Amino acid sequence: MFIVLESEVQRGLTTLAIEKTLLDIGKPAYEKVSNMLYKNYHCYIPDCYEHPEYLNETLKKIYGNSYRVIVESIHKQLEEFAY
């Protein structure tokens, strides 16, 4: 019998939302963000659930003010999962 904690489900859904948003932009965007997260913070996309500031700073460095559009897209993905 598996017991899945709600936080694990939320972490998984958050990871999916981030990955889908980045892959919708393009695989190079996904790879660039993933590589920069590892280079600067020694973490991976799933770790952004506990440390959203890592993703936020990485997106700002890569996309400047346009990072807000990406963050909004991630939020929309998460809203879809809520239903």
Image: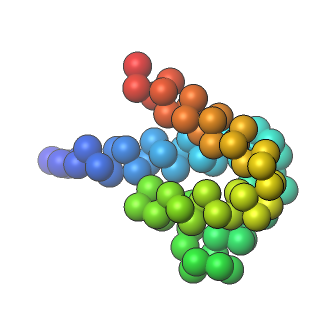
Say whether residue 40 is left or right of residue 79. Answer: right
26 and 68: which is toward the camera: 68
Quadrant of the rendered image containing residue 41: bottom right
Residue at (46, 63) in percent of width and height? 51
**Foreground of the two, 21 or 63:** 63
Residue 11 placement (x, y as % from top left) = 40, 50
Residue drawn at point x = 77 percent, y = 49 percent: 65
Picture coordinates of residue 19 (x, y %)? Answer: 63, 48
On-image quarter of the C terminus: top left
Q: Is residue 20 visible?
A: no
* Residue 67, horizontal then vertical, whole percent: 73, 48
Q: Is residue 74 visible?
A: yes
Q: Residue furthest top?
A: 83
Outermost residue on the front side: it is 65
For image coordinates 50% across by 58% down, the residue present is 52
Image position of 77 with respect to 39: above or below: above
- Counting from the top left corner in percent of width and height, residue 62 is at 80, 61
Is 40 drawn above or below residue 29 in the view shown? below
Horizontal placement of 76 versus 47: left or right? right
Judge from the rendering whether residue 80 lies leftward or rightward of residue 24; answer left or right: left
Name the image colouring: rainbow
Above or below: residue 38 compared with residue 46: below
40 or 30: nearer the eye?
Answer: 40
Q: Residue at x 80, y 55 (%)?
A: 64
Q: So how many labels did they put on this image?
A: 0
